Amino acid sequence: MPPKKKTPAADPVASQEEDVSMAEAPPEEPTEDVIGDDANPAILGVDEQPIRVLAGSSEKAASYEFAKEDHTLGNALRYIIMKNPDVEFCGYSIPHPSEAVMNVRIQTYEGLALDALEKGLTDLMDLCDVIAEKFVAAREDYTSEMQS
């Protein structure tokens, strides 16, 4: 069998958009990746819930299943929840790599496991906000320093 002829590839540089620095880029519209009843059906599927309580849960010890999540959220959330002094144990697992599911187990000394989960999610969002603010400030300092 004779070798196939190579077709000339399009110029990759010509097909790309012009590179724009982060400071000059227009702000992107926020996406609607909301956890809860208003979740984006294109991301989750029509009947899929983003978070559900697994069977065998009690008020002080509960397991939650997060749809379409992985180690990125799991490890950060586990770390933040374990900082709560009312939490006895928090762990997460990915049951199988081919399934887009993450399970989180929370056991508390006192209080509800659901409250610990909500506090952990809130604290993690606050931490991400602080990191984003510091990044933007450092980027602005660097940009002004480079222009001087």
Image: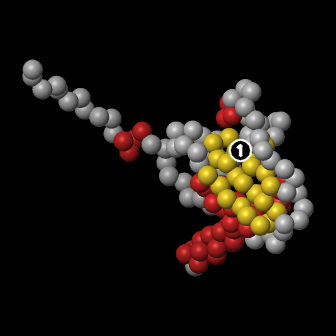
Above or below 12: residue 105:
below
At a point 76% along the width and 57% down the height, the residue shown is 106
Quadrant for residue 71, please give it: bottom right
At a point 74% along the width and 47% down the height, the residue shown is 64
At a point 52% along the width and 43% down the height, the residue shown is 97
Q: In the image shown, does 146 or 45 lie closer to the viewer?
A: 45
The reply to whether residue 7 is visible in this rendering is: yes
Q: Residue furthest top?
A: 1
Estimate the x, y position of residue 105 in percent, counting from the top left. 72, 54
Estimate the x, y position of residue 100 in percent, counting from the top left. 60, 40
Where the N terminus falls, by quadrant?
A: top left
Name the side, left or right, on which 110 lies relative to 33: right
At a point 65% along the width and 69% down the height, the residue shown is 135
Above or below 99: residue 86:
below
Q: Residues within 10 Å of mark 1 (few under 14, many from 20)?
A: many
Element under disc 1:
strand
Q: In the image shown, does 135 or 122 lie closer to the viewer?
A: 122
Name the side, left or right, on which 5 lies relative to 116: left
Estimate the x, y position of residue 148 in percent, counting from the top left. 58, 79
Estimate the x, y position of residue 21 in percent, counting from the top left. 56, 58
Q: Which residue is mark 1?
A: 65
Q: Amino acid at mark 1?
A: Glu
